[in-house]
Image (tube, helix red, strand yellow):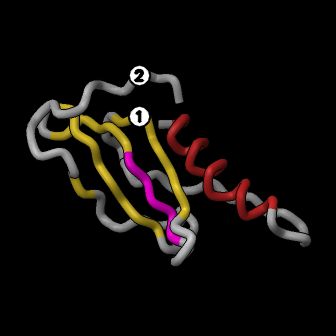
Amino acid sequence: MKRLRFALACAVMFPVAGCSGSDIVLEPASSPAGAMQAGDVSLVRDPGTGDVLAAWVARVDSSWRVRFARSADAGRTWAAPVTVTPAPDDASPPHGES
């Protein structure tokens, strides 16, 4: 979970900080995964809205699934995660490279 939080903070704050001419203030982003087993997070910023989009592999109902959530406030809060893989174990367990 610490890796997921660190990845979220880096992905959200470094692009913003690189474009700013003012003092940089970094804030850790919250994790949309909550306390569940999760890993292999992917983050992207929607250029049209500025929203942060997150996808990750998580243990849901004793099987591995891909989950998705959106943040409109740079990762401080997240919309409720949704499962995007239709069948149990459509995803493999996290690999730990992230």
Q: Residues within 10 Å of mark 2 (few under 14, many from 20)?
A: few
Residue 81 to residue 40: above or below: below
Magenta stretch: residue 47 in it?
Answer: no
Residue tagged by mark 1?
Answer: 39
Ranked by sequence position, the earlier of labels 1 and 2 is 1
Residue 53 to residue 60: above or below: below
Residue 62 to residue 76: above or below: above
The x, y position of residue 41, in whole percent, is: 45, 41
Report the magenta stretch's main SS.
strand
Q: Amino acid at mark 2?
A: His
The x, y position of residue 43, in whole percent, is: 50, 51
Residue name at image x 29 percent, y 38 percent: 58
Position of 49 compared to 68: left or right?
Answer: right
Residue name at image x 31 percent, y 40 percent: 36
Residue tagged by mark 2?
Answer: 95
Marker disc for residue 79: none
Q: CA distance from mark 1 to mark 2?
A: 8 Å
Does the CB distance between marks 1 and 2 fall below 8 Å?
yes
Residue 5 to residue 69: above or below: above
The x, y position of residue 24, in whole percent, is: 84, 63
Residue stretch in magenta? 51-55
